Structure formats: C-alpha cells, structure tokens
Image (cartoon, grey):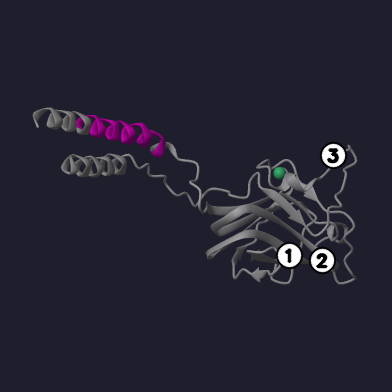
Amino acid sequence: MMKKSLALACALSMALGMGTVAFASNDDTNIAMGKTPMASSDKVQTTSDGTVLSMDKALDGNTSTRWGIDGVTPDENGNFTTDVWFGVDLGAEGTFNKIVILWENARPEQSAEGYTLQYSNDNETWTDIDARFEYGAEKTNDAYYTDTATFDSITARYVRVNMHKGAPLNDEFKGNPSIFEFEVYGTMNGAPATPDTDADTMIPIALATAALSLGTLMFTVRRSAREQ
Ligand SMILES: [Ca+2]
C-alpha cells in the first residue's frame, strides 16, 4: 500500500510538472496602457469643440486622444511655477526599461531642465531615472513629438514625468502641457503577462501531455493493484 501511494505521488508530480505552462516575457509591452492615471492636478482643458482632455486619454493607446492639464503658468523664463507632473499607477510592481512620451505642441523643453522621469514604490518618495533620451522632432501630420527614454531596468509601481520648463520655441505653447500617450515598456511582476502566440499553442500541448501521463499512471496503478 505504501509503495503504491509513493508511486502515485511521484507520477502525479511528474504529470503536473509536465503540464506547467511557460509564458514568454515581452519587454515590448506597454504596461501603462489602460492603467490608472495620476497627475499633479485634476484640472484639465476642454477644447473649443467640447472635447475634455481627461487624464485617461494619455493611457488609452490611442494616439489621437490626449490629456491636457489646465491652470499651469510658467514664469518669464518658461519655468513652471507649480508642480506639474503626469504619471501612472501600474497597480502592482512592473519591471521596465523604456518610456515613450507623445507630446502635443504644449510640452516641456526637450532637455534635462525641461523634465525628469521618476519612479516610486510608495507614491510618496520619488527617484529620478537616469535615462538616455532621444528627443523626437514634431510630426507635422498630427502634431506630436515622440521622446524616447531608455535606461537600466527598474522595478516599481508608480512612474511619472515631472515637468519643469515649458517649450522654448513658441511662447504660445509654454503653459498647460499636453500628452497624447505616456508609454512604459516592460513586464508586470507577480502575474503572468498576456501569453504570446507561441504560448497559446503550448498550453493545449502541455495539458495533453500531462493528461496522457496521468492516464498511463492510473492504468499502471490499477493494474499493479490487481496483480497484488
Ligand atoms: Ca491617447
């Protein structure tokens, strides 16, 4: 009896082990999309056609919709006189190494003085990200600038862009920064990411293998029991 129980446990472990599903990691996933937006102020602009530039529109994956803060006033040198930041609560820790921001014309200066990227694990203490920037030129067809920042992998729940100085090229756009998309690229920790195509095909194969192993095991145990 003891011998049969031990054999069953071993075989079950083997069967379950073979049924483990492998999820591929994907660092090209925008883990900010659809997550909870955060900003220094919930005051937002409304365009002349009545469109409300709410915070969620910078995390909706749509490059035609945007967030636009209201009530931001730069001084004569373009420095913002109040805290101006936009960020995302990922809902859990993520590990990421790239941030892409699609700015509208109203944006901070594209420089270290213009804005800083930051992360936090408690939404209170923020740490600057030591990033390498590629500042994008204006896209004339839909008027956004794509800035790309890459850096060594960081694990955190909260990520934001802290803005200091308005656009220097045109005073008209110095105030009230606006973002089409705030993208954070990496993987979420603790929960499996959405399986890619290869993982989708692996699942039934792995489970079928496990089922076959379990079937063989049951047959062996029953036969063994009858023979004793
Ligand atoms: Ca958008």
Which mark, by number, is residue 83? 2
Magenta residue check for 39? no
Cα separation, mark 2 vs mark 1, equals: 8 Å
With respect to residue 94, does 141 lie above or below?
Answer: above
Mark 3 residue element: loop
With respect to residue 147, does 13 lie above or below?
Answer: above
49 and 171: which is toward the camera: 49
N-terminal of the pair, mark 3 or mark 1, is 3
With respect to residue 99, does 115 lie above or below?
Answer: below
| Residue at 59% over, 67% down | 131
Residue 167 seen by the camera: no
Q: Name the amino acid type tagged 2.
A: Asp
Labels 2 and 1 touching (C-beta < 8 A): yes
Give x and y (percent) for residue 115: 72, 66
N-terminal of the pair, mark 2 or mark 1, is 2
On screen, residue 84 versus residue 50, left or right, reads: left
Q: Name the amino acid type tagged 3.
A: Thr
| Residue at 81% over, 45% down | 53
Mark 2 residue element: strand
Give x and y (percent) for residue 80: 84, 67
| Residue at 35% over, 42% down | 20
